[in-house]
Image: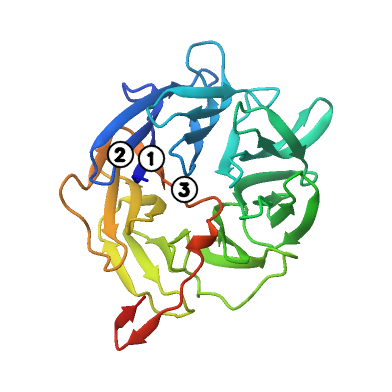
Amino acid sequence: MTEYLYATSYADPASANLGDTLNKYGLDGALIWSETVYDTEGFAQTISGLAVDASGYAYICGSFSYSAPTYTHVAKFTPAGAVAWAVKVLENANTVECIAVCPSGNVLIGFERESIGGDYYTVALLQAADGAVLWRADTGADSAVYKVASDTSNNCYAAGNEGTDTYSAWAFEDDGTPIWTDEGGLDNHTLAAVVYGSYLHVDAAYLGVPATMRLALADGVENTDLWPILLILAFDRFGRGYGLLQFGASSLVYQLPATLASVPEWNTAWTDADSPLSLAVSPDGYVFVCARLADTGDGIIRCYDAETGVEQGGNWPVSTVGYCDRVATTPGVYGAFPSAWLPAPHIYVGNVRYE
């Protein structure tokens, strides 16, 4: 199928743009359509999560509306930009923090712990066809879920915090039955949770120091054989990891090889104070990074060749009104990977790789 890039941009409340936007681009950077949702509940940010399925449907979560005074928490958009469905899943205007699409097409969401019908929950699975709630689950008192993911068996994974300063991860079967809980002890600001192969990779920053946890899908036991403090935000179909870091006024986009190594295959530095916020990898072989521009507060999306790290020209980079805070490609990289995406063996002769 044809690949596309989706991005969300956040409107500064002080600007003339009063809504957040969901944008669809071709891989050449040309804008295909843009849809706006509005904040009527006083939240600083309206869209808090983005996911894309293999058919090109886009899903956003947060707390937003199409017309005052109603609000919704999750919406599904067709490839043409029409709203397929929009649902309210929490009893008040609280924000749904994160979203992922399972291989089944059902939609996994996470949020801060909330009472719904007298019981407390932090995770829910929505039906693909209409957004109806299939099940809800709770991750414990004082917990909140900030990232979710799914594997090829439709098992569901959540990452967030338990209490004020303890990072945790949770696993559920596709019917909501708990499988395991792992308390990692990291800070609660998880940046990514990606299922790849037989592991759940969760990236977090503890006191500003980046770290990656690698938890076995079967039992949640941590594998400590990790890439050293490099945030892995996405994998391509060959098993190579990609990520981004920020060091003061400099930013770094990099690629790691399929085997563990301490040195990236390539890296591209930004020498200005632009803040990188999200990364996605296209099956066509491109890496997309979105950022907030330091001088204007608006957004920018850069495109790199996944093999070489060379920044692409043409329509790239793309500018957005309001800073761009997340990107995803079709099929989305923050959910489950088809079995065909599992790492393929490689033969290296010098620095030449043969498939």
- Judge from the rendering whether residue 347 lies leftward or rightward of residue 196; answer left or right: left
Disc assigned to residue 25: 2
Which residue lies most toward the right here?
118
The C terminus, quarter of image: bottom left
Indicate the secondary structure of the residue bearing disc 2: strand
Q: How far across and how far down the image is residue 195, in percent?
A: 58, 58
Q: How far across and how far down the image is residue 131, in percent?
A: 62, 28
Q: How far across and how far down the image is residue 254, in percent?
A: 36, 66
Identify the image quadrant of residue 241. bottom left
Q: How far across and how far down the image is residue 155, in percent?
A: 69, 52
Distance (Cα) linking label 2 and label 3: 14 Å
Disc 2 residue type (three-letter) = Tyr
Q: What residue does disc 3 label?
A: 332
- Judge from the rendering whether residue 5 lies leftward or rightward of residue 338; answer left or right: left
Distance (Cα) linking label 3 and label 1: 9 Å
Disc 3 residue type (three-letter) = Gly
Residue under the point 55% across and 23% down: 86
Q: Is the residue under label 1 in contact with that under label 2 (CB below 8 Å)? A: yes
Indicate the secondary structure of the residue bearing disc 1: strand
Of the residues under marks 2 and 1, which one precedes in the sequence? Answer: 1
Number of numbered discs? 3
Indicate the secondary structure of the residue bearing disc 3: loop
Disc assigned to residue 6: 1
Camera sees residue 166: no
Residue placed most toward the observer, 283 or 318: 283
